[in-house]
Amino acid sequence: MGGGSTVVATGNIVRCYEKEFKEMGIDLSQEFKEAENEIPIRLSTKEIQASGSRAIYEAALSLGYQMEAMPKAIDQQKCIKCGLCINGCKQGAKWTAKNYLNQAVKQGAVVRYDSRVEEVLIDQGQAYGVRGVNAEDEFEYEADKVILAAGGLGTPVILQNSKINNTDVGKNFFIDIFVNVYGITDDVNQLSEPPMEFVDLEFHDQEGFLLSPFINRQKMIRFIEAGLKGMRLKEKNLYVCDASVFPSSPGMPPILTIVALAKKLAKDAA
Ligand SMILES: Cc1cc2nc3c(=O)[nH]c(=O)nc-3n(C[C@H](O)[C@H](O)[C@H](O)COP(=O)(O)OP(=O)(O)OC[C@H]3O[C@@H](n4cnc5c(N)ncnc54)[C@H](O)[C@@H]3O)c2cc1C
């Protein structure tokens, strides 16, 4: 799907894992700035927040919690507060990675939809393309550089199929899960807003979780990001650019960091 999981995301756009990547020698400060200039990010406001979330916010403050408005990439003028961001936004109010994809297409990139990559073509330790299947047939595309971006679930499988020389691939899978706590109230609701309009980050550094008002009305299992620990590829011309390069779960919305990593990779691989 063009845009990947950003199409079903709730529009939370925050920096995460910056310190951890820096400790690994990957300084993303410049790339974060570039991404933040390109993605229209603004704090959630009263105009868009539902009564239930505001009640939670005000109760949290009165109890001494550090609840704040969430930085969102949602155009509040276009948003109709249907609360269905995770089904994809029909109003076009939410920023998605399709913006970048459309820019690439304008620059001459060709997108092959309905095509499943199965393995990287490698000859003598050098990647030179991919092989896969589409609706009609098998395909092979050759390339000077191969960048896998099939996400934490897809990329490890492609790498395993490719029999690359790396014993870490496919191990240390993580998911970042939601724990929902519900209560019953009269008169207020949380349904008429993009989910997660507020956030409390005070427990993140020590305990690894954040607090946010969210109603999981579809009762769907929600994968925030899936990753694979410690991937280092030795094959030449082969790169990975998705959540699978996080060595551990960031426990925070990762889209902005994945965009920053993509920018870094684009510069380094050019
Ligand atoms: C409901 C929901 C809400 C979320 N909300 C937020 C949020 O508000 N903020 C935030 O920061 N994060 C959010 N996330 C998490 C975030 O969207 C993902 O972690 C992030 O987009 C992952 O990016 P990725 O590039 O690793 O993978 P993906 O975005 O999953 O992209 C992988 C792409 O590769 C394709 N693919 C997979 N296998 C193959 C193959 N073999 N061949 C070809 N193509 C393949 C997939 O179809 C997909 O298009 C949310 C996630 C979900 C599910």
Image (tube, rainbow, N blue to C red):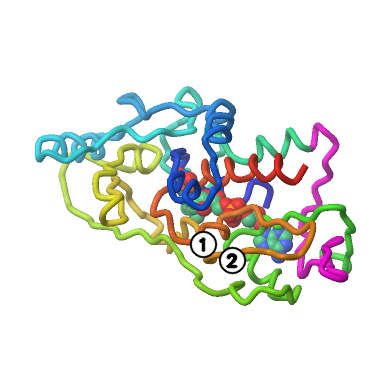
- Marks 1 and 2, how far apart in space? 6 Å
Q: Is residue 147 visible?
A: yes
User: Measured from the top left, where is residue 93 in percent x and y?
Assistant: 53, 31
Callouts 1 and 2 close, C-beta under 8 Å: yes
Q: Quadrant of the C terminus?
A: top right
SS class, disc 1: strand
Which residue occupies the foreground of this view, 127 or 40? 127
Q: Secondary structure at mark 2?
A: helix
As shown in the figure, which amino acid type bears the numbered disc 2?
A: Leu
Q: Is mark 1 within 8 Å of ligand 1?
A: yes
Compared across the picture, whether 71 is left or right of 185 comes to: right
Q: Earlier in the sequence, mark 1 or mark 2?
A: 2
Q: In this view of the protein, which residue sits in the foreground, 124 or 249?
A: 124
| Residue to which mark 2 is pinned | 153
Task: Check mark 2 vs ligand 1: CB closer than 8 Å? yes or no.
Answer: yes
* Vertical position of residue 211 compared to residue 130: above or below: above
Q: Is 147 or 68 nearer to us in this picture? A: 147
What span is colored magenta in the figure? 105-133
Q: Tell me if 132 is positioned left or right of 47 in this view.
A: right
Residue occupied by mark 1: 226
Give the numbered dot on residue 258.
Answer: none
Q: Quadrant of residue 177?
A: bottom left
Which image quadrant is residue 244 in? Answer: bottom right
Amino acid tagged 1 = Ala
Q: Position of residue 47 (x, y in %)?
A: 34, 24
Residue 4 x %, y %: 62, 51
